[in-house]
Amino acid sequence: MKRAIITGVALAPCIALSSNLVLATELIYEPTNPNFGGNPLNGSFLLSNAQSQDDHEDPNSPADLYEQPSALDRFSDSLETRLLNQLLTDVGDGNSGELITDDFIVQIVDTDGVLTVLITDRATGDKSEIVVSGLNPTN
């Protein structure tokens, strides 16, 4: 048993010196990113990894710019549309009319088949006039 220990101790430096004889190949750097000479098929993989890690929000995203109107705003818009529809129906029967809202004033006048619609923007005071002729109800 002593002989085996002595042989092992004597052979240990020989084994350590012989490990320098191990064959190795040279290391070759191959980039992963296709922008730096890597395989072009890695591009979509790298892009999907980058997008999955991106936690920044775009402040100008169209989804952030749109605000859902409240129920009251939708009701007001619907009511204004209904009132304008009724006003135009009354003009078709030969009556004139006017509708005043927070944003604009609409005046509709029918004189002998010539329909005049005057729209005034209450915020700026700008006026638009629409004239439609040839609306004679007897034709």
Image: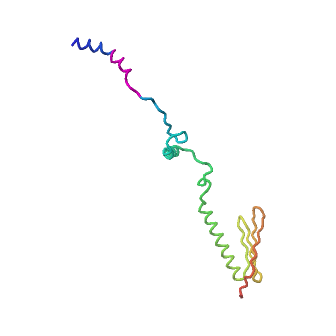
Identify the residue shown where x is 54% and y is 39%.
36
Q: Position of residue 2 (x, y in %)?
A: 23, 11
Say if the magenta span includes residue 14.
yes
Q: Position of residue 45 (x, y in %)?
A: 48, 45
Residue 11 placement, left or right of 122: left
> Principal SS element in the magenta part?
helix
Residue 119: name its quadrant.
bottom right
Q: In this picture, is 19 found above or below 46?
A: above
Identify the residue shown where x is 73% and y is 66%.
104
Q: Position of residue 137 (x, y in %)?
A: 71, 85
Say if the magenta span includes residue 73.
no
Q: In this picture, is 139 found above or below 123?
A: below
The stretch of residues the image draws in magenta is 13-24
Q: In this picture, is 75 found above or below 59?
A: below
Residue 49 placement, left or right of 132: left
- In the rendered image, the quadrant that contains the C terminus is bottom right
